[in-house]
Amino acid sequence: MSTFAEDIERAAGGAERIEAVVIGPFGLGSIDDDDDLYDQRDDQKIPRDKLGRVLSWREARPLLDYDYDNGFGAPDCHAVYVWTADKVLWVTQYDGATTIDSAPRSPRDCIPYMPGGG
């Protein structure tokens, strides 16, 4: 089992390639929800002043380095946008399974796919 940060690194192709991260609310919550509404363990709690702000990977990684369940059920991680030199990544959930998807950062020839397809 890997941590959320490790899965982001794997999807990005390596930690050294991550340029910036913006962290959003946990799971299906809203950034306006009270902290009591979040079903988070202590290691998943991120200070509100870090949410919605552009962070370096060095600053964001320790906040996202927690065990999470990417299996079926509500998302067990924070919403994120992650930028590398080549792509933008985000969390996708399909049929209860959580994955990290990406798209090219700039226009280029490629074959688009539809996340969640079989």
Image (cartoon, rainbow, N blue to C red):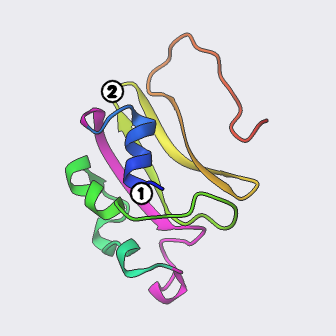
| Residue at the (40%, 72%) spot, across then down | 44
Amino acid under disc 1 = Thr
Task: Report if residue 38 lies within the magenta region.
Answer: yes
Which dot marks residue 52? none
Q: Which residue is mark 2?
A: 85
Quadrant for residue 19, please give it.
top left
Q: In terms of secondary structure, where does tag 2 sit?
A: loop
Q: Nearer the viewer, mark 2 or mark 1?
A: 1
Along the horizontal axis of the image, is 51 left or right of 11? left
Say if 53 sits above or below 117 in the image.
below
Q: Which residue is mark 1?
A: 3
Residue stretch in magenta: 16-39
| Residue at the (55%, 66%) spot, across then down | 76
| Residue at the (26%, 60%) spot, across then down | 62
Residue 78 spot, x, y in % from top left: 47, 62
| Residue at the (54%, 85%) spot, across then down | 37
Residue 86 spot, x, y in % from top left: 39, 24
Q: In terms of secondary structure, where does tag 1 sit?
A: loop
Amino acid under disc 2 = Ala
Whether residue 56 is visible? no
Residue 8 spot, x, y in % from top left: 42, 45
Task: Report if residue 13 lies within the magenta region.
Answer: no
Q: How many discs appear?
A: 2
Quadrant for residue 74, please give it.
bottom right
